[in-house]
Image: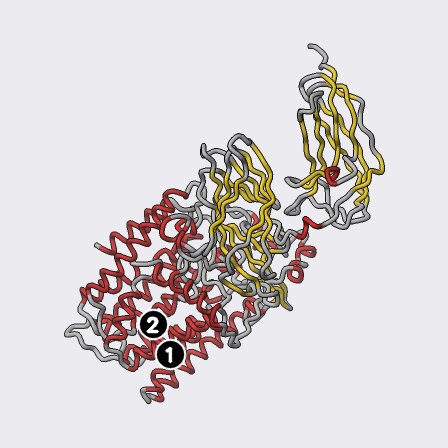
Amino acid sequence: MLALAAGLFFLALGAIRAPLATLDGDEGTYLAMATSLVRDGDLRFTEADRAWAEAHPAGPVNLILQQGAEGVAYSKPVAYALWAAPFVFLLGEIGMGAANGVALLFGLLAAWAWLRRRCAAGRAALLLVTFAGAGALVPQLAWWMTEPLQIGLALAGLSLALGAARPVTTASPGWWATRLDRPWALPAGAVLLGLLTSLREPNLLLALLPAGYWLLARSWRRAFVALTLMLATVALVLAATAMLEGSRNPYRAVRASFDAASGYPAGPGAAAVMAQFEEHRATQTLQVRPRFEPERSAVATLTFLVGRHTGLLVYFPFLVALVPAALRRPDRLTFVLLAGAAASAVFYLVWMPGNYFGGESFVGNRYFLPALALFLFAPTGAPGRLAIVSSWILALIAGGSAALSVARYTAIDPGSQSHAHAGLFRLLPYESTARTIAGRRDRYWSDDFLRFTDPFAEVASGSFRLQAGAPPAEVILATYWPGTPLRLLVAAEGAGAVLEVRDWAGRWRFALTGPGEPMARRLLTLEPSRPWRWHSFWWTPDSPSYRVRALTFRLRTPTGEGEARVRYLGRGDALAELVSAQLLTGSLPTGGRAGGETWLTLTVENTGTAPWSSGAPLPVLWGYRLYDADGVLAGEGRARLPREIVPGEELTQELAIGWPQEPGRYRLEVDLVREDLAWFGDTGGGPLLAGEVEITPRPGP
């Protein structure tokens, strides 16, 4: 009944999520690798691969490729592609999901054999269903990634390599359980753990555990077999990787991401695209050395346990039953397995406390996923019924919150993280600071890094908009300068508008407009609480240590209507810059037709100390204003600059002036404007051009 309920729950979530045809993150690369193996039997990136990537039904596919002596090839571990290719050959692209399902099922069957050696069939089934269903293990099947294969290899490899470590205690364990004592079980398990290591290097901590246990048990032959076969398998996979991709380790190769915007390094224009390997290299250099910083590791531990996207107690609540059961009557194997789990956690929390544990396309801690098998095998006896019930209650709370969030916001955010936009998850710390591969939510404004984590802000070039009555928008802000207040420039529409800003320890309210004031602009100073994380980003390991904060922005009005445009100015350095312009050529027209337009050609020189850019957080634009005889604003317009204009540079551009519908005499002012802040002429000297114009009626029919 629990298995059926969990299955129906996941199917319901899947029905209101993005379609399986959508490719997020690394999915496109893995699918392309399997498809390439089916098509031509290799992993070289050729013009046929480019044609496939450009014509995919989900749109041009994002690919991670590497450059080597023999050309361009895909740059991901080959074991997963080799495993998935036969399924893709038989079933098409949906075969990726089938490959994941078979891998996970194989691992669960091996775990069943392990549990049946110590438990009756009913209790073993309950434990296995709770392990797979009371958490985010099954949803991993929905993404065409290596995680289901990794957990399947971990479950099967550890079951086979350590099956003989504990004797059979049940009266009728079944045929599968007795196979774990056979001589072939240990070698088979060692090979599977070698394959697990080839998929992600830190998995070596798990793969070494059987050899370590058999050494402690003084079974020298078994230790030797476990270690040598595991390492030999890793070596064979590395050799296969070098043969198929051109390098033994794709993560250390010269690699980069390619998509529709960058183009692909094959076919027409490939020579120009190849520069991506140098200009936007994605090679990862893992420095395995202790970086113990108590405060930083403490924050990492908190998010590791209860983080919004990867917290173990939220996404794998069966741990609340397995860990106490393991500590109740531990044996030597219990200590070895728990030590392996601790070592895997310490690797991320101490050696790499700045590393992220999740990502845009995932739920649950995908890096720690294989280590969950250690907790399943660690107890010498089965957890009690109360502990199992507690796991399901916690899973019900988390799953119910996720379902409500997805059901409410799927229309505006069909992605995998819509479960975290409301309810329980919104209260948990947000730990992921990794850059999305497609760059859809990441911005660098005023030399700082901003990530918009939810759909409740409309992000434009240099600004974001908030709607009154909408949920608060959350922004992850990373700065590399300490202690300086943040500056915000806000343009609000709607009487009585108030901007609310919150972080983990503070709350601020800024009045933007008065009760009878329809619109206003405000320059705000914000002194947020202490940053909760410090680290360099993984794709820029040599960058300064960023200070990371999570801020929420909400706009409130008495009527629930209105909007505000927020410009993030960082420390506000741009506010101190001198901006000025000198008109070199250009003149105003004497008049125009009502409802028509007139084009002006103007040449100006940047006589200030700062460049002009229409794409900056504080953009510089062309603008004009028309005032009627009473001095009331009757019309205005804007035009973007064609490029950045540095100090001393001249710019010639045409500007269209749109005339009002009513004939009459108007005053026209043409100038440059720093949007939402001030016109150039307001700081002294007046506008570039100003004068009276006569607007005549339009001709009759």
User: Mark 2: few, some, or many residues within 10 Å (few <14, many ≥20)?
Assistant: many
Dividing the picture into quarters, in which one does residue 346 lie? bottom left
Q: CA distance from mark 1 to mark 2?
A: 10 Å
Residue drawn at x 43%, y 51% is 417
Q: Is residue 368 left or right of residue 245?
A: left
SS at circle 2: helix
Labelled disc at residue 409: none
In the rendered image, the quadrant that contains the C terminus is top right
Q: Is residue 355 left or right of residue 487?
A: left
From the viewer's side, name the closer residue of 503 and 533: 503
Q: Decide which of tag 1 and tag 2 comes sooner along the chain.
A: 1
Residue drawn at x 18%, y 64% is 122
Circle 1 residue: 209
Please say whether residue 61 is visible from this viewpoint. yes
Q: Vertical placement of 701 versus 423: above or below?
A: above
Residue type at mark 2?
Answer: Leu
Residue type at mark 1?
Answer: Leu
Q: Position of residue 690 (x, y in %)?
A: 78, 30
Circle 2 residue: 374
